[in-house]
């Protein structure tokens, strides 16, 4: 008889984990405390319907689970080949991501989630069951050979108990599965909020078809748009209908002080993002800024990710919540599923061994990407406008193009090379960075020497000119 598994959370990672497990013959029940999101309109802007950038790690993980499914769920992606920096004076500057035309891709979170739920519906009901309005309250861990007991409160508040062979917790950054595991195993755990609030804004589709952009887009859709203003920033990613989902990121103190009056918000947005306001409509942007939910961003690190004996494991944000500045949270969560499945396969379904191996091999990569994501906030909001940073990036990409696989910029390794684990990418980048610093210093020194020599050559002529 096939083993039974409770997947807690029907978000992005939970759905993919459920699909992967069902394909391996497990009897899967997916629980989520929300109602079925497909019953609501995804155009309701009050929903957390931010769009996400999906890149190589996410895409290859979907393909590993099921290539045809990947094609179906990714049918709406919009490729983005680079960042478009919007300077305060209105100048736009394209900074290409890949060395050889690689792209990251914009996709609406709600749409992707719904497509993954549709994929679960394709399985027979004796293989996969979806139970919405079921909130996990408690897990009673039993001996490994017994059924583990999950206690949910259903919509009517009535407690329901389900016995399963094992549990996969994909219930997001405030995971109850993780809380419950902490009572069973000595888990190292840390949670840290960063001083950054995010507010979703919206750029409507252009009223007319724009030939250049092949759609009703008022900005080029093939870039991730950034308005970097050092301590805060605005970003925007294209949607299929020509609109852009835009997100403001800034320190909580700044946001709280702006929210004291409508005119402050208005003045702030107009002063710092005049071109974006022209597209959003200032009044509309002010209204969204004031009334839309204010999101907090946090990092969660923990270890181990499993309960011994193959009884429970956590994946996705439940195991490693990270700030969104490398666009890797979901990508990494999808990769968790791939890594987990490969270990289950390699251990011929021996869960105890596979779960143990998962914690042992995955931890360093998860820590690496959590730290990189924090570092990237400074890059997106500030460094992208600095000459020194841009020079270093230029040298980095020249070397990448020249030396091909022997020199890989960090962004390339993280976003386009799923075959390089995060931890290894950081180690390679640290080595390359030392070389880059030397090259950059030499370039600056030679420019200074040349400048000095040129000045000395010109000096007599300048003196003559001054005297005459
Ligand atoms: P979630 O999406 O949080 O899903 C968890 C699910 O569990 C939910 O459906 C919830 O209802 C359910 N649940 C919770 N508790 C319970 C319970 N007790 N019982 C039952 N069900 C429960 N990632 C990228 O890769 N690229 C990006 O560009 C990107 N941009 C982002 C931008 C922002 C502003 C933010 C905030 C995040 C971004 N991310 C991005 C990160 C990405 O959104 C997350 O990493 C991803 O959603 C994690 O998926 P998950 O399934 O692990 O968790």
Image: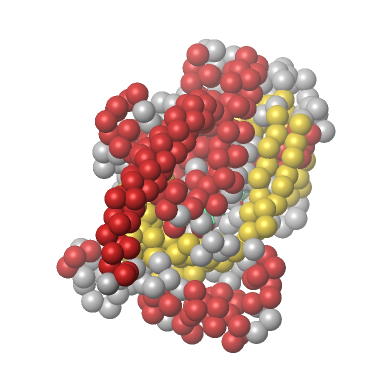
Foreground residue among 81 and 12: 81
Image location of residue 263, percent across then percent down:
59, 87
Foreground residue among 125 and 218: 218
Left or right of 25? Residue 145 is right
Q: Is residue 271 visible?
A: yes
Instruction: Pick out the residue farthest to the left.
Output: 211
- Asked if 378 appears above or below 264 in the picture, the reply is above
Q: Which residue is rendered at x = 33% and y = 60% of the image? A: 93
Color theme of the render? secondary structure
Image location of residue 85, percent across then percent down:
39, 60
Left or right of 264? Residue 342 is left
Q: Which residue is rendered at x = 39% and y = 73% of the image? A: 89
Foreground residue among 141 and 288: 288
Q: Which residue is rendered at x = 80% and y = 27% of the image? A: 186
Foreground residue among 307 and 195: 195
Q: How many labels does the image show?
A: 0
Image location of residue 159, percent across then percent down:
76, 47
Quarter of the picture holding the N terminus: top right
Quarter of the picture holding the C terminus: bottom left
Residue 358: quadrant of the picture: top right
- Asked if 299 appears above or below 460 in the picture, the reply is above
- Asked if 127 appears above or below 55 in the picture, the reply is above
Left or right of 65? Residue 219 is left
Q: Is residue 170 visible?
A: no
Q: Which residue is rendered at x = 49% and y = 74% of the image? A: 272
Instruction: Pick out the residue farthest to the bottom.
Output: 263
Image location of residue 341, percent across then percent down:
50, 24
- Asked if 327 appears above or below 157 in the picture, the reply is above
Left or right of 218? Residue 267 is right
């Amino acid at each position: 008889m096939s083993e039974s598994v409770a997947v807690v959370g029907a978000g992005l990672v939970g759905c993919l984990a459920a699909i992967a497990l069902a394909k391996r013959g497990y009897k899967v029940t997916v629980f989520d405390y929300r109602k079925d999101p497909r019953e609501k309109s995804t155009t309701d802007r009050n929903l957390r319907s931010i769009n996400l950038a999906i890149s190589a790690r996410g895409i290859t993980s979907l393909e590993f689970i099921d290539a045809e499914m990947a094609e179906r769920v990714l049918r709406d992606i919009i490729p983005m080949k680079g960042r478009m920096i919007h300077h305060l004076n209105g100048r736009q500057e394209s900074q290409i991501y890949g060395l050889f035309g690689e792209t990251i891709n914009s996709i609406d979170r709600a749409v992707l989630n719904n497509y993954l739920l549709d994929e679960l519906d394709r399985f027979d009901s004796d293989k996969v069951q979806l139970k919405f309005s079921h909130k996990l309250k408690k897990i009673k861990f039993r001996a490994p050979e017994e059924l583990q007991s999950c206690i949910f409160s259903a919509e009517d508040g009535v407690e329901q108990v389900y016995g399963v062979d094992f549990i996969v917790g994909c219930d997001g950054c405030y995971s109850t599965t993780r809380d419950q595991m902490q009572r069973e195993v000595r888990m190292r755990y840390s949670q840290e909020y960063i001083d950054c609030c995010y507010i979703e804004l919206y750029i409507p589709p252009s009223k007319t078809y724009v030939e250049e952009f092949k759609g009703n887009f008022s900005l080029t859709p093939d870039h991730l748009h950034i308005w970097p203003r050092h301590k805060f920033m605005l970003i925007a990613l294209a949607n299929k209908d020509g609109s852009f989902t835009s997100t403001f990121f800034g320190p909580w103190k700044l946001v709280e002080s702006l929210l004291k009056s409508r005119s402050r918000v208005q003045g702030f947005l107009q002063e710092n993002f005049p071109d974006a306001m022209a597209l959003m409509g200032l009044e509309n942007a002010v209204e969204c800024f004031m009334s839309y939910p204010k999101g907090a961003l946090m990092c969660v690190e923990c270890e181990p990710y499993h309960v011994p004996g193959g009884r429970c494991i956590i994946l996705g944000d439940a195991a490693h919540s990270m700030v969104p500045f490398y666009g890797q949270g979901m990508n990494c969560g999808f990769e968790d599923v791939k890594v987990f499945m490969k270990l289950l396969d390699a251990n011929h379904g021996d869960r105890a061994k596979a779960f143990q191996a998962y914690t042992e091999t995955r931890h360093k990569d998860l820590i690496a990407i959590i730290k990189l994501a924090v570092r990237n906030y400074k890059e997106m909001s500030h460094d992208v406008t600095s000459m020194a940073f841009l020079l270093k990036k230029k040298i980095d990409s020249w070397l990448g193009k020249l030396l091909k696989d022997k020199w890989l910029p960090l962004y390339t390794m993280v976003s386009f090379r799923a075959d390089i684990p995060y931890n290894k990418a950081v180690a390679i980048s640290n080595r390359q960075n030392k070389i880059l610093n030397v090259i950059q210093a030499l370039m600056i020194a030679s420019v200074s020497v040349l400048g000095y020599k040129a000045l000395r050559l010109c000096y007599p002529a300048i003196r003559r000119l001054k005297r005459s």
